[in-house]
Amino acid sequence: MMASEFVALSLTPVLIAAFAGMACALPGNFLVLRKQALIGDAISHVMLPGIVVAYLISGRVTTWPMMFGAAGAAIVSVFLIEIIRRLGRIEFGAAMGVVFTAMFAAGVLLLEQSETSEVHLDVEHALFGNLEMLIWLQSDGWGSLLDLNALAQMPPQFFRMLTVFLLICLFTYIFWRPLVLISFDEAYARTIGTQAPLIGLLLVIFAAITAVAAFDAVGSIIVIAMILCPPASARLLTNNVRTQVFLSLGLALSATLAGYILASYAPLWLGFSDTVSAAGMISTLSGVFLAFSAVYGRHRKRIV
Amino acid sequence: MLWSALSLSLGYNATLVTLGSSLLGAAAGMAGTFLYLSNKALISDAISHATLPGLGLAFLMARGFGWDERQLAILLTGSAASAALGLYFVTLLTQKTRLTQDTAIGCVLSVFFAFGVVLLTIIQTVPGGRKAGLESFLLGSTAGMLYSDALLILILSLFTTLLLLVFLRPIKLITFDASYGETLGFSSRRVEILVLFVALAVTVLGMKIVGLILIVALLIIPAVSARFWSEKVDVIFLISAGFGMISGYIGSTISAISPSLPTGPIIVLCSFGVFLTSFIFAPQRGILAVALNHHRFQKTVHLTQGLLLVAQGQSIYEPKTHRLLRRLGYVRADGVATEVGNSMAAKTLLNERRWSHWNKLVRDSDQFDDQTVFSLMDIEKKLTQDQINMIDQGLVQKQQGQV
Amino acid sequence: MSGITLVSNRGFTLEGQTGQDAPLNIRGMTVSYGQMPAVYSIDLKVKSGSIFGILGPNGAGKSTLLKAAMGILPVVSGQISFFGKPLKEARHQVAYVPQRTSVDWDFPATVYDVVIMGLYPSLGLLRRISKSDKAKVAESLSKVGMQDFSDRQIGQLSGGQQQRVFLARSLVQQADVFLLDEPFAGVDAATESAIMLVLQNLQAEQKTIVVVHHDLSTVTTYFDHLFLINRQSIAYGPVGEVFTKENLTKAYGGKLGSTQLGTIGL
């Protein structure tokens, strides 16, 4: 395969998926430790009504209104879950189940009622993303990475995902201590003056931002799988938070690279004429990694 | 139109679908109650997402064997098998590794679903795959449903509901108190497997109508709503079944009248409407009642504590208490009690002393309850006049004894 | 009113405490779960420099009292101050040791990782951990006899060791008042005496220690002041005055048999 062809057709999708995967895995570590693993699942469901409402208001299927709509819906859902949980004294998981199904149902209904379904805004797109479409036609081999003009022509999703990834890294770096503290002992955290509820909320909001940025590029499935599978696998491989976080980044990265190759090239090598969903394959592979960690992981067993 | 729909005279298919979703709603309501009350509500989310790869594989295998790959029974069997496998993985991850249940659920649902998507993209490329309409299982679609499919769903739903009803007693018992149930000879593990089986059946049967993404709502929302109305397990089961049934019935009826309204979302939104009503208006646990009771309780506490301080001639430091007493005209701005305030204070103190004496009298009897704060209750409303007279005599004697 | 003279029956008056700057001062505190008061109208002044026991039967609201004082639970009414200041201003003077069972010990951390959490307030978000910080951790660990366990995974600790780690975490805070929630629950005898020794040393340094406790047999040896509670205040004062048969019967009701009272020497 020619280098220029690889750079043009595969480099950007791979990079975008890799940044998306790592950006998801990072907050995922703390969500797993805080036993809020399923919040990613909820967020990726409620983005649909947000997108539809944004479309109905703006009348356009363009990136930014959709992103704002999705982010708005995610934040609304987080607050709704919190209100229902606290005021109704309902367990977190159940409160989440009520909110995300109701909001998703409202989204589907709105979608069917509006003309939106005629333009390219369907559930499948939100689920699967369009990773394979994020090509960089203006490139001409690896040298283009140094060519500012060519770089400017890269799919905007690349810069968006990169920014979000760096933002999440920064957030995790700055708030490392409180994040670890509230994940281990929230009550104690409060007694030494940590704004535990605020940090917890920030964590969820950052996870939501990642989910929103990622779904447009790679679809919701990757989001849910990458928030959970790499951190869960990493948890079974190490007994140290810091190592766990770095391992989860590595696992997310490897799942992305290997998954993309499996989806886009392996079928062709095997003689099939069509590729399969890269997003689906990447997520599946992250599950395979988890399966291996669950069977062979050094720290897979619970001690206490 | 509405009447003919509600009275089930909209034609065979619509009637079958309506009956089917009502039954599924009821079964899901009951199975969901068990799951919710044992903190496993979201396990249904894993079940539903895990159906997708089975759906795809069943389709591909049926093609391979040369069967009719759109045969609903084949597709449902495949879905059920992969959902069961997903469920097995959730249990395995939770029991054999240190991962918690929510993480296990999330991992299984996302990976199974993702693999299902991979299979769907493969199916898109095989001849006839694009037209197979497997996507309709994601969001459900009753339009164009075959009569035989509707009948199959109805019969299986009936079977599921009956199965649940037969075993309802042990299920309720284990939900109420697992260890007590065990002593009566019911295995909580078997009950759980049974309930998960029912949840799986509901999911698979409801897929065509409600869609696999939204089917979890049937297993969660009615149970959560029912919890607001009662503290008794028996009653919660009954209410939850009712809520599920009504949502299924109304939802499928509405979408039968106007086909532009998709069945699944309408059923879920009906269910959510029931939830909202319960959440806000339920008499004990609803948020209005809770807020009102809490306000009243807080007032009683502040009033009682404040008036006791007045009675003891101590000053009131708590600003809230002070404001309350001022607003009621019991104390003046400078903190000195008014005449009404003094008489109220005396009354509160008397109440306190009477309770205290009563507690002394009953301390050794089985009427004694040391962990109820009696001071906040009006003794004249709780005890008979005779009892109060007896207490007062005791108090007078004690006082004379001291003098 | 049946001719009854109305005298306060609230059991005791709060004398002997001068000033409002007691290490912990609670006035009229009520905390409720729903409509049920978990603790009602608690007045409590902790004497400076004492080892102060909070004693009562199960469900009496001992832990609730502590949690509410630390701002973890909301109060229905009441005022709480530490050294005359609200908690917000006195945070650095107060150290709280939660119940050992309140956290999931299957957390990926070592003993060192947990103890250094006590330094987070002074470390802030990003300040590097210095040699002297590490020395503080090591010193606290050796005070509780866990100096050799610094790199041990917390999941591998016994209950008693977990409790010592929690105590060490509070020690690095270098607070003036320590609030311990059931530190002796489910720990071995060696740990119990080790913890008690640490607390006595703290007392010698003029620190104040508040301990939620449930074991009647050790009350007189462990504490110099006692607060008896069963939802409401039962009695308060020096151990010798409070730890009487009458008060205990008031707090525990019929649950306390005469044989039990006999074994604790009452």
Image: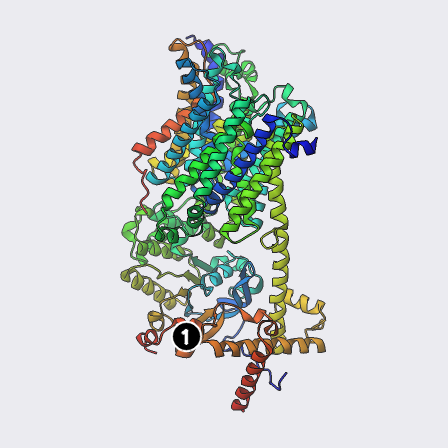
Q: Percent x, y for residue B389?
A: 58, 82
Q: Identify the image quadrant of residue A101.
A: top right
Nearer to the camera, C108 or B279: B279
Q: Residue at x 68, y 73 (%)?
A: B335
Q: Identify the image quadrant of residue B385.
A: bottom right
Q: Amino acid at mark 1?
A: Leu
Q: Is residue C225 left or right of residue C156?
A: right
Chain ID, mark 1: C
Q: Percent x, y for residue C186?
A: 33, 59
Q: Is residue B28 above or below residue A88?
A: above
Which residue bears the numbered disc 1?
A: C248
Q: Is residue B305 above or below residue A104?
A: below
Q: Is residue A183 visible?
A: yes
Q: Is residue C135 above or below residue A213?
A: below
Question: Are there few (<14), some (14-19), or many (20+) residues within 10 Å of tag 1?
Answer: many
Q: Percent x, y for residue B312?
A: 60, 78
Q: Residue at x 45, y 21 (%)?
A: B56
Nearer to the camera, B142 or A114: B142
